[in-house]
Image (cartoon, grey):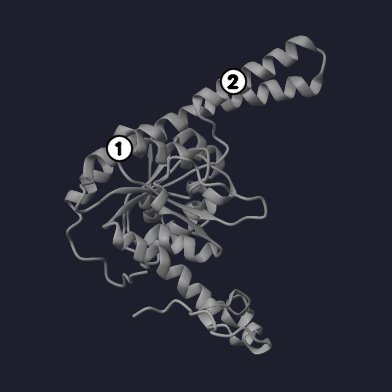
């Protein structure tokens, strides 16, 4: 059945009126406040149907900072900052910039680990017929780019779930183009990040990374999703940022809640934990588990 709108046989004042347009072909109508429930449904359905069309059965989600550079970019930026400082050594602002670039160069090791992790995972489980453990990221630069890049290095597909922001977020160039999505609603984006995932791998990051991490921890803690490996890369970073044990001491979480996640330091260690978990995860979901 062809549902594309047919142009009117005769153009008149009536046929030019917005009210004459079919509802599904009327952007102004679809963007009304009253149509928000419809837009939410569409944003749920479109990625779901596309992922089904590409035989993607399961994913591994990688979170992390958009501000972690690739090694090549970090080295270039550091050299530029050092050259500027050498030309004006008494400039306090240039001194701060040079130190910031040195720190950034240190953090690029996380980019390398995320890229290697994306490659290892993608090589392990994807076939043309069924695609499992497909790398899925937030679609932006930094750690997200690195994980998508690793999948690309392996010649496998990967997914990017971008979000429309006041300052436009451009999809990184390593996402499989047919699997690059743009979301308006954070809630729907988060839902898609978790609907198929077999594990959550979290690299150092800021507010957005913490938001996504704690939402997932909460969903596992409350039985809304089944337990899965939640792996935090870089124990030193995470222990500096969050005092998990203090939360136990204060009585706001239980000691067993610390078992929901683990620290890891390498791509190989992360993949070993995930693959081992999957071999022993055939038991039914815990009582009270509800699908997303």
In the foreground, 252 or 175: 175
- Tell me if residue 136 can be seen: yes
* Residue 277: x %, y % from top left: 23, 48
Is 141 left or right of 197, judged from the image as shown?
right
| Residue under the point 39% across and 52% down | 178
- Residue hosting label 2: 76
Is 246 left or right of 3, judged from the image as shown?
right
* Residue 95: x %, y % from top left: 74, 19
Q: Quadrant of the N terminus?
A: bottom left
Mark closest to the chain's N terminus, 2 or 1: 2
- Residue hosting label 1: 155
What is the secondary structure assignment of the residue under circle 2? helix
**Picture quadrant of residue 153:** top left
| Residue under the point 48% across and 61% down | 189
In the foreground, 224 or 199: 199
Is 143 above or below relative to 287?
Answer: above
| Residue under the point 40% across and 66% down | 222
* Residue 258: x %, y % from top left: 40, 50
Separation of residues labelled 2 and 1 (CA atoms): 27 Å
| Residue under the point 36% across and 38% down | 152
């Amino acid at each position: 059945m062809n549902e594309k709108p047919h142009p009117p046989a005769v153009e008149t004042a009536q046929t030019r009126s917005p009210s004459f347009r079919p509802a599904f072909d009327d952007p102004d109508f679809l963007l009304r406040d009253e149509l928000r429930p419809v837009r939410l449904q569409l944003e749920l359905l479109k990625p779901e149907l596309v992922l089904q069309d590409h035989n993607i059965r399961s994913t591994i989600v990688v979170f992390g900072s958009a501000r972690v550079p690739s090694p090549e970019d970090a080295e270039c930026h550091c050299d530029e900052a050092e050259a500027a400082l050498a030309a004006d050594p008494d400039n306090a602002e240039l001194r701060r910039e040079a130190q910031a670039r040195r720190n950034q160069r240190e953090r690029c090791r996380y980019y390398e680990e995320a890229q290697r992790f994306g490659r290892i995972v993608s090589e392990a489980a994807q076939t043309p017929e069924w695609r499992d453990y497909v790398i899925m990221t937030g679609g932006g630069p930094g750690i997200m780019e690195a994980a998508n890049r690793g999948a690309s290095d392996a010649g496998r597909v990967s997914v990017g779930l971008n979000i429309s922001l006041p300052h436009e977020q451009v999809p990184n160039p390593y996402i499989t183009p047919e699997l690059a999505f743009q979301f308006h609603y954070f809630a729907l984006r988060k839902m898609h990040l978790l609907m198929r995932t077999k594990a959550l791998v979290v690299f150092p990051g800021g507010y957005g990374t913490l938001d996504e991490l704690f939402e997932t921890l909460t969903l596992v803690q409350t039985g809304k999703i089944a337990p899965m490996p939640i792996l935090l890369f870089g124990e030193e970073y995470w222990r500096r940022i969050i005092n998990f044990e203090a939360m136990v001491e204060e009585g706001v979480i239980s000691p067993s809640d610390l078992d929901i996640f683990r620290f890891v330091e390498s791509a190989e260690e992360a993949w070993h934990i995930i693959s081992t978990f999957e071999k022993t995860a055939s038991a039914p979901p815990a009582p009270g588990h509800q699908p997303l």
